[in-house]
Image (spheres, helix red, strand yellow):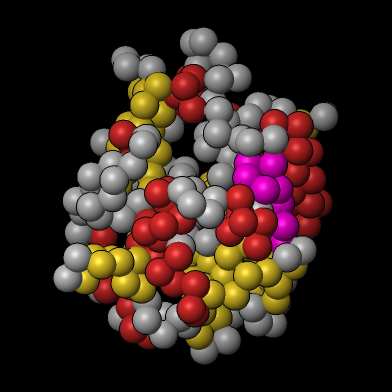
Amino acid sequence: MNTITLGDVEITRVVERHREFGPLRTFVPGVPDPAPAWLTPDHHDPSTGGMIAAAQTWVLRSGGRTILVDTGVGNDRVRTNPVFAGWQTDFLERLSSVVDPSSVDVVVNTHVHADHVGWNTHDVDGRWAPTFPNATYLIHRADHEHFKGTEVHDDSVAPVLGQTTLWENSFRIDENLELESAPGHTPGSAVLRLRSGTDRAVFVGDLMHSPYQVTDPLCNSTFCLDPAQAQATRLRVLGRAADTHELVVPAHFGGHGAVEVAHSGPSFAITTWAAFPPLATP
């Protein structure tokens, strides 16, 4: 089962697509060439140089409500970035086997990039309509403002604004879950902190694309809009995760999907992978 429980919160992993997304060093230029062998096979294919990653959604059940963390790429999208254009997957059917879309209470978008907001909407008779009609969508105000007028905002954010809460700084969802600003990758990037009983987790979106960035937190992805701020945020979030034993849950890791980390000099080390079953090598 793709489900673990932390305290009173159940977490289920629903994968939209797991594959090679392109050259690893195109996505994360600071990865050495050749890449460290420990990234193979779950995160890197040395035969192609490719980054193995997942587009996925985390389904949280907390306090009697259902919360989604990021909604993936979506079907039928026209995108400038060809990596995310024209997808056709059965993601909605797989998600529906876990939760009825009409019963989702909250949708968290960690930031407004194409692979995090796509299933906010779906095509209904030629128009984009909310996929989760009864949910409150939570989007950081800074990202909403920054991405206005873009193709992603037009088809995946604008149609849900009538049921969206734009937040700043922090936003408490319930007694177990709180959003916190984590800028750098985008102006409104956010992390979602889980604290329930003695268990801790932090859903970090695109703070990291590759596990290599745990061991070298100054290594940015090519998509970080403010590189210096992204580095500072990564150091801060990983430092707290190491200090408080938070499970770090990035948006795109393949394999077991999430890690526990520890301080290792000025950097960090991966100590344990999460109990999710590993995704099969594509």
Furthest-bottom residue in view? 64
- Location of residue 206 (image quadrant): top right
Residue at coordinates 41% horizontally, 42% vertically from top-left?
254
Nearer to me, 86 or 106: 86
Which of 77 and 212 lies nearest the eye of the viewer? 77
Inspect this view and state whether residue 48 appears: yes
For the N terminus, the image quarter is: bottom left
Give the answer, above or below, for where 149 lies relative to 125: above
Which residue is farthest top?
Answer: 33
Q: Quick check: is 184 in the magenta stretch?
A: yes
Q: Is residue 239 visible to the viewer in this orientation of the structure? A: no
Classify residue 63 as left or right of residue 91: right
Judge whether 64 appears above or below 231 on screen.
below
Q: Residue 227 location in percent, x, y? A: 70, 31
Q: Residue at 37% x, 35% y: name it.
A: 81
Residue furthest toward the front?
149
The number of callouts visible is 0
Q: Can you give x and y, in whole percent of width and height, for residue 28 in the image?
A: 54, 26
Taking the magenta stretch, the answer to whether it contains residue 63 is: no
The residue nearer to you, when weighing 166 against 95, is 166
- Who's the residue at 58% across and 40% down the image? 208
Q: Residue at x 55, y 81 (%)?
A: 62
Query: Which segment did they paint magenta?
Result: 180-187
- Image coordinates of residue 20 in percent, x first then y, are 32, 32
Magenta stretch, main secondary structure, is loop
Residue 74: horizontal and vertical position, in percent? 31, 55
Observer-nearest residue: 152 or 21? 152
In the rendered view of the protein, which quadrant contains the C terminus? top left
